[in-house]
Image (tube, grey):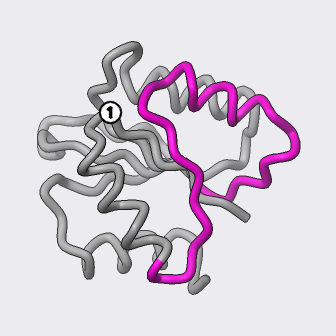
Amino acid sequence: MHLLVVEDDDIVRMLIVEVLDELGYSTLEADNAATALKILEAPEHNLALLMTDVGLPDMRGEQLAAKARELRPLLPVLFASGYAESFNVPEGMYMIGKPFSIDQLREKVVSILGTP
């Protein structure tokens, strides 16, 4: 099972992936929605979670989440945003505000998925 991390900022994406890997989760990465959709469409990728930035260059995170849910209706979605207080989280999805600590990320992912 993989966690798909979608973040257009290379450094932020690298740090998120590094933390998730250290916590024992297996990750796939995308720097835009188009790449993420290719991963989501590929049946060989067994995904446990989609973690996406809200502000992607080619599509809003909410739009990506909606398309992801069309492809994989039960896939949990975790949004990351620097504007978490003004973001309306769709029902059945989750939010973590940027910047977040390693502990906050771990606690949020574990609360969604359980321990790796």
Residue 6: x and y in percent read 44, 40
Magenta segment:
22-49
Q: Quadrant of residue 40?
A: top right
Find residue 29 and report its horizontal and vertical position in percent. Answer: 52, 46
Q: Which residue is mark 1?
A: 8
Residue 15 sits in quarter = bottom left
Residue 72: where, in percent of width, then height?
Answer: 75, 39
The 10 Å Cα crowd at callout 1, few under 14, some 14 to 19, many 20 or more, is some
Question: Does residue 88 show up magenta in the picture?
Answer: no
> Is residue 33 covered in magenta?
yes
Q: Residue at x 25, y 76 (%)?
A: 102
What's the amino acid at mark 1? Asp
**Residue placed at 22% from the left, 43% from the top?**
81
Residue visible at 79% across and 54% down? Answer: 46
What secondary structure is marked by label 1?
loop
Pick the quarter of the image with the C terminus: bottom right
Between 64 and 93, the one nearer to me in the picture: 64
Q: Is residue 31 left or right of residue 12?
A: right
